[in-house]
Image (tube, rainbow, N blue to C red):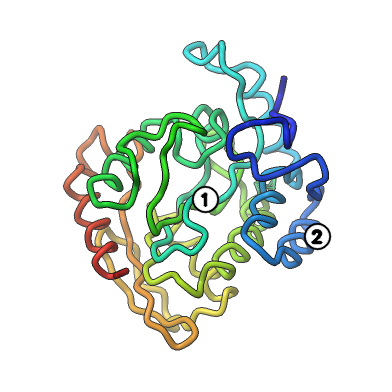
């Protein structure tokens, strides 16, 4: 099988067989704009087929699998935003991993980056469990939501500019729908930092004219609806970064404990 059909019992599957399917960029714009709730939006995200190259790749990976997961069913669909529906902290990543989120159906779940991320979130009081291995494992984010700026696993972790642009309305609409409660936005890596600014603007944030450079622990105060919101940079807990020590557990804890204290 190349993907899990919507509404067939996968834990936390937001979609049903009736969820509208976006087939091109115009559909993404229209369906994202029409989504009045996070439930509607995540359902539609999770069945999107607007990027032919990414649809083919995610389903090919789901069919062929990695040997270690040969007995598992892969999700093989876009990975929607996940977590608190009225979050105070929003985490923004790049894209799901081919054998992580594309397998488990949940963002950062079942891959090495997620191991680091969820362990730190748990130590900082933002996740109920220290591990996140499969949808339905009891993991829960606390006052926190995670989304990816591109919802499908891309070959070599590199979405094209066209794919980033096509997926953009899913992110900007999700940011807009939760903006009323969000007090801190954390970008996981430089690409997420770059990607989130136009989405924040689209969602009604008042932003500085020049975009400050990305860095670990960088903080920028902006406003939304008159309320202060802090944007923070955090190095991505990728295997490359954690192997080389560019990111340590302490560094992640520093950012997430700071985010937690700002969000109170
Ligand atoms: S990357 Fe985004 S727009 Fe493209 S198919 Fe996946 S969910 Fe749809």
Q: Residue under circle 1? A: 148
| Residue 64 x, y percent position in the rendering | 63, 16
| Residue 255 x, y percent position in the rendering | 25, 57
Task: Identify the element where label 2 is drawn.
Answer: helix
Q: Write down the quadrant of residue 132 in the picture.
A: top left
Of residues 184 and 125, the one drawn nearer to the viewer in this rendering: 125
> As drawn, is 138 to the left or to the right of 51?
left
Q: Write down the quadrant of residue 3 in the picture.
A: top right
Q: What is the CA distance from the residue labelled 2 to the residue labelled 1? A: 20 Å
Vertical side of 110 occupied by 262: above or below: below
Task: Identify the element where label 1 is drawn.
Answer: strand
Residue located at (49% from left, 85% from top): 225
Vertical side of 247 occupied by 173: above or below: below
> As drawn, is 233 to the left or to the right of 14?
left
Q: Write down the quadrant of residue 182 in the picture.
A: bottom left
Q: Is mark 2 within 8 Å of ligand 1?
A: no
Q: Residue under circle 2? A: 26
Residue located at (65% from left, 63% from top): 37
Residue located at (47% from left, 81% from top): 224
Dot 2 or dot 1: first in sequence order is 2
| Residue 145 x, y percent position in the rendering | 45, 55
Of residues 130 and 53, the one drawn nearer to the viewer in this rendering: 130
């Amino acid at each position: 099988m190349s993907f899990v059909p919507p509404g067939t019992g996968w834990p936390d599957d937001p979609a049903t067989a009736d969820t509208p399917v976006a087939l091109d960029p115009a559909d993404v714009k229209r369906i994202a704009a029409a989504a009045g709730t996070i439930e509607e939006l995540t359902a539609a995200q999770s069945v999107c087929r607007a990027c032919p190259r990414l649809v083919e790749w995610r389903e090919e990976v789901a069919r062929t699998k990695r040997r270690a997961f040969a007995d598992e069913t892969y999700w093989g669909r876009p990975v929607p935003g996940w977590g608190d529906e009225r979050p105070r902290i929003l985490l923004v990543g790049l894209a799901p991993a081919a054998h992580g989120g594309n397998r488990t159906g949940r963002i950062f779940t079942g891959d090495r980056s997620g191991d680091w991320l969820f362990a730190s979130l748990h130590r900082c009081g933002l996740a109920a469990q220290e591990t996140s291995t499969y949808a339905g494992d009891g993991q829960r984010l606390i006052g926190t939501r995670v989304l990816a700026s591109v919802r499908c696993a891309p070959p070599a972790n590199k979405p094209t500019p066209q794919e980033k642009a096509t997926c953009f309305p899913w992110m900007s609409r999700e940011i807009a729908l939760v903006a009323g409660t969000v007090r801190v936005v954390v970008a996981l890596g430089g690409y997420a930092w770059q990607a989130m600014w136009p989405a924040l603007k689209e969602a009604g944030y008042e932003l500085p004219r020049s975009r400050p450079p990305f860095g670990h622990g960088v903080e920028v105060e902006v406003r939304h609806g008159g309320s202060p919101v802090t944007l923070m940079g955090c190095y991505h807990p990728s295997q490359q970064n954690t192997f080389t020590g560019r990111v340590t557990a302490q560094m992640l804890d520093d950012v997430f404990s700071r985010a937690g204290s700002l969000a109170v």
